[in-house]
Amino acid sequence: MIHEIAILTIDPERAAAFEAAVASATPYFRSAEGCHSLSLEREIEDPSRYYLFVQWESVEHHTVKFRGSAGYRAWRELASPFFAAPPVVTHTHVVTRDP
């Protein structure tokens, strides 16, 4: 299991519309092969910055299967008009966890 972390920068004046767009796109993630969960969090110190956390079965489920899908294209169509900067995307895996 891996985590995709996407840092998304938007105009804070458009936050409500952006959050609605992400909510509309959630089914595209949830129906994607290998997607286990998704959450969107807004940074307190910088309200223009959001973090999209997606748990995937593997990096390939995100970068190959999802990014090559109609669901990804729909997600980008909904969300990208709000981006004030290109998203920064990285992948991580849990090394240790406090139960």
Image (spheres, grey):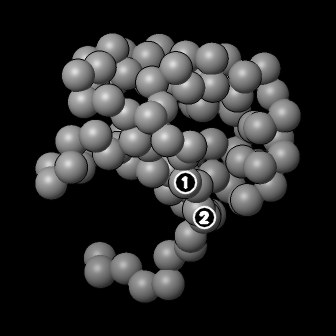
Q: Quadrant of the C terminus?
A: bottom left
Q: Secondary structure at mark 2?
A: strand
- Choose between 56 and 19: the one closer to the eye: 19
Q: Which residue is mark 2?
A: 91
Q: In front of the other: label 1 or label 2?
A: 1
- Outermost residue toward the left? 45
- Residue 26: image location, x then y, percent: 50, 25
- Outermost residue toward the bottom? 96
Let me know if residue 16 appears in the view.
yes
Let me know if residue 25 appears in the view.
no
Q: Which residue is mark 1?
A: 88
- Residue 97: image location, x then y, percent: 37, 79
Q: Quadrant of residue 52?
A: top left
Residue drawn at (63%, 52%), measured in percent from left and top? 56
Determine whether, in the image, residue 90 is placed left or right of residue 32. Answer: left
Q: Is residue 65 above or below residue 58?
A: above
Determine whether, in the image, residue 34 is placed left or right of residue 11. Answer: right
Q: Secondary structure at mark 1?
A: strand
Determine whether, in the image, residue 13 is placed left or right of residue 97. Answer: left
- Residue 64: image location, x then y, percent: 84, 46
Q: Is residue 88 above or below residue 24?
A: below
Q: Quadrant of residue 96?
A: bottom left
- Choose between 91 and 12: the one closer to the eye: 12
Give the residue type at disc 1. Answer: Val
Q: CA distance from mark 1 to mark 2?
A: 10 Å
Q: Is residue 73 above or below residue 38?
A: above
Q: Quadrant of the N terminus?
A: bottom right
Give the residue type at disc 2. Answer: His
Determine whether, in the image, residue 43 is placed left or right of residue 3. Answer: left
- Residue 98: image location, x then y, percent: 29, 80
